Amino acid sequence: MALELTEGLVRRGHAVDVITTSLLDTRRGRSLRTRKATRDGVQIHYLATPARYRWMGITPTLPLVLARHARPDVVHVFGYRDVVTTAVAAYCRLRGIPYVFEPLGMFLPRVRKLRFKRLFDATAARHVASGAAAIVATSEHERRQLTAAGAPPDRIRIRGNGFPPPPPPPEGRLRGSLGLADEPLVLYVGRLASGKGVELLLDAAAHLPGVHVAFVGPDDGHGTADLVDHASASGPTAGRVHRLGPSERPLELYGEADVFVLPSAGESFGMVAAEAAAAGTPIVVTDRCGVAEPLADAALVVPYDGDAITAAIERLLADAELRARLGAAGRATAASLSWDVMVARQEEIYREVLGRP
């Protein structure tokens, strides 16, 4: 998401530098040296990251890189509760540089290590939100969450995530790997983690005989992947539930599914549903996901409830005309909410922060 924004800003004539941990350089990973790279005009500084704790990279060269860097007009802080974002926000406050804070759905502590997160929020990160010139929410749903969690409501600005362009026609790679022909196929893409509603989709599979459900995504270590493995090997879903690892080309998978389901208990947005919409795949999404707002007329939006999710899947599989209508509406929504539209909106926020027309 940050990549699409930064590349779009460069196309609009802005100079953009990204400072991040080398952990995000998927080709080289953890590094003892800071290095630079250029991607489509974006200057990327991969900070030396000799150590890490889960998602948090330890970046001792960050102060030196900031000191050597030319003073920016505005800084955009992506994410929350890590070394880089917390330190950069503090640096901006110290230097009087306006910054935009985008928490990426992390502002509200949830899932695990809640005591640590609350302690971190009350100490090291206590001024990250209050010191921001603007706070970006990707949906009205996230705006409400931010306000409830104590973010200054007058500084919150909504800028959704962009929908991707239509992917190429499906090649049958997913169905081929599962040995499926015309059998009904329901697709889930995302982390196998607590709060993602995976158990609700597994329950739906148990009540939908003959329907196959494919889970594509990484194991987040919550034990959720074990539930999928158990369902794939035993009980009424044996042989019909399939777990695949992360895909290098997920956009090519959506078009092979009859239905895409995002059963999450809470998403600030939910990019996987936006990707499914661009592919024209009929969607079931819970009303706890921010993406449900722009997809209101292009998906079946249901409560976070197993029976509701099961009924929605069953309805779509039984109604080819409804699937075709929702698929067409999803494509139209994706075309009207492209990344170009969201980059222009982000530029408006920067200009507002800087007091420029």
Image: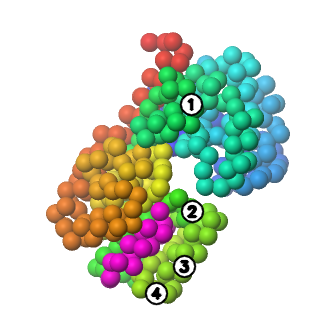
For the residues marked 3 and 2, what is the alpha-carbon distance in whole angstroms? 13 Å
Q: Earlier in the sequence, mark 4 or mark 3?
A: 3
Q: Which residue is mark 2?
A: 193
The crowd level at tag 4 (other Cα within 10 Å; few <14, some 14-19, many 20+) is few
Q: Quadrant of the C terminus?
A: top left
On whether residue 203 falls in the magenta region, the answer is yes
On whether residue 15 falls in the magenta region, the answer is no
Asked if the residue under mark 2 is in contact with the one under mark 3, i.e. CB atoms within 8 Å, the reply is no
Q: Which residues are magenta?
A: 197-216
Residue depicted at 44% across the width and 67% down the height: 200
Q: Which residue is mark 4?
A: 235
Q: Earlier in the sequence, mark 1 or mark 3?
A: 1
Q: Amino acid at mark 3?
A: Asp
Q: Is residue 260 above or below residue 349?
A: below
Instruction: State the image coordinates of residue 85 (x, y, percent, origin top left).
Output: 68, 36
Question: What secondary structure is marked by label 3?
Answer: helix
For the residues marked 4 and 2, what is the alpha-carbon distance in whole angstroms? 22 Å
Judge left or right: residue 36 versus residue 133.
right
